[in-house]
Image: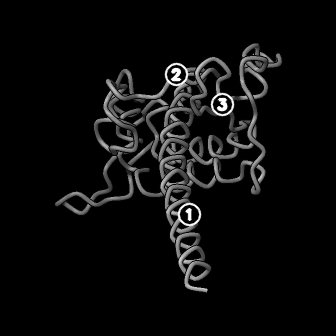
Amino acid sequence: MLFKVLLFVFFLIFCSLNAQDVVRDVRLDNKEIKCLVCDASIKELTDLVTNTDKSQTVKIGGHRLDPQGNYDSPKSVSVVKSEIFLSELMEAVCNKMDDYVRGLWKSNKTLTILKMITSDGQMNPHMSEVEFIQDDDLNKSLKYYCEIIVEEFEENIIKYYQNEEKDIETKFCIEESHICPPKSQTLPKIEL
């Protein structure tokens, strides 16, 4: 009888240890996915900004009074430097996360997210290199992570584009927000 009780206790301990490992793996998986989403979102946003007609302008200002009681005259700026325009693009980018799927590279079993259709309308040529992971939420978590990132860091992201920064993925996802690990530990590049 004592043997059965001890066996049962060892079984429970073994199960709880395995459950802790699974929880730990899920947390790591979520952190990696969030990093991949950050990288993909910034790449998508950069692509949208790059393909926007730079000759389009919007007027900003003109709604404040100067010390003499006169309205400031509005200034014209490129649409890609407009806070409202960039905010709208960020919402569009998060909707694009519906076009991505989660998977593992067959070559090294590292986690990735892959855009199913490339920007030129073709099937992604890397699809055969990835083993897709079917998840319970049908990849809705990718859009959710994007929305969380945009909500938390929208003003910071806008500043990068207004200042015409280069390599925003590294500056934002790694250096500023710390969503991704430093480059020496970074995950493989995402293929858009």
Q: Which of marks 1 and 3 is in front?
A: 1
> Mark 1 sits on what residue?
19
Kind of residue indicated by mark 1: Ala
Q: Is residue 17 above or below residue 141?
A: below
Residue sitting nearer the eye, 15 or 2: 2
> Mark 2 sits on what residue?
189
Q: Is residue 166 above or below residue 161?
A: above
Q: From the top left corner, tell me how far across and down residue 82 is, in percent.
A: 46, 40
Q: In this view, does 191 lie to the left or right of 84?
A: right
Decide which of tag 1 and tag 3 comes sooner along the chain.
1
Looking at the rendered structure, the number of numbered marks drawn on it comes to 3
User: Which residue occupies the extreme left position in the image?
Assistant: 67
Q: From the top left corner, tell me how far across and down residue 125 is, in percent.
A: 76, 13
Residue sitting nearer the eye, 61 or 190: 190
Q: Which secondary structure lies at badge 2? A: loop
The crowd level at tag 1 (other Cα within 10 Å; few <14, some 14-19, many 20+) is few
> Mark 3 sits on what residue?
104
Decide which of tag 1 and tag 2 comes sooner along the chain.
1
Q: In this view, does 74 lie to the left or right of 91?
A: left
Kind of residue indicated by mark 2: Lys
Decide which of tag 2 and tag 3 comes sooner along the chain.
3
- Image quadrant where residue 124 sits: top right
The residue sitting at 50% across, 33% down in the picture is 39
User: Which residue occupies the extreme bottom position in the image?
Assistant: 1
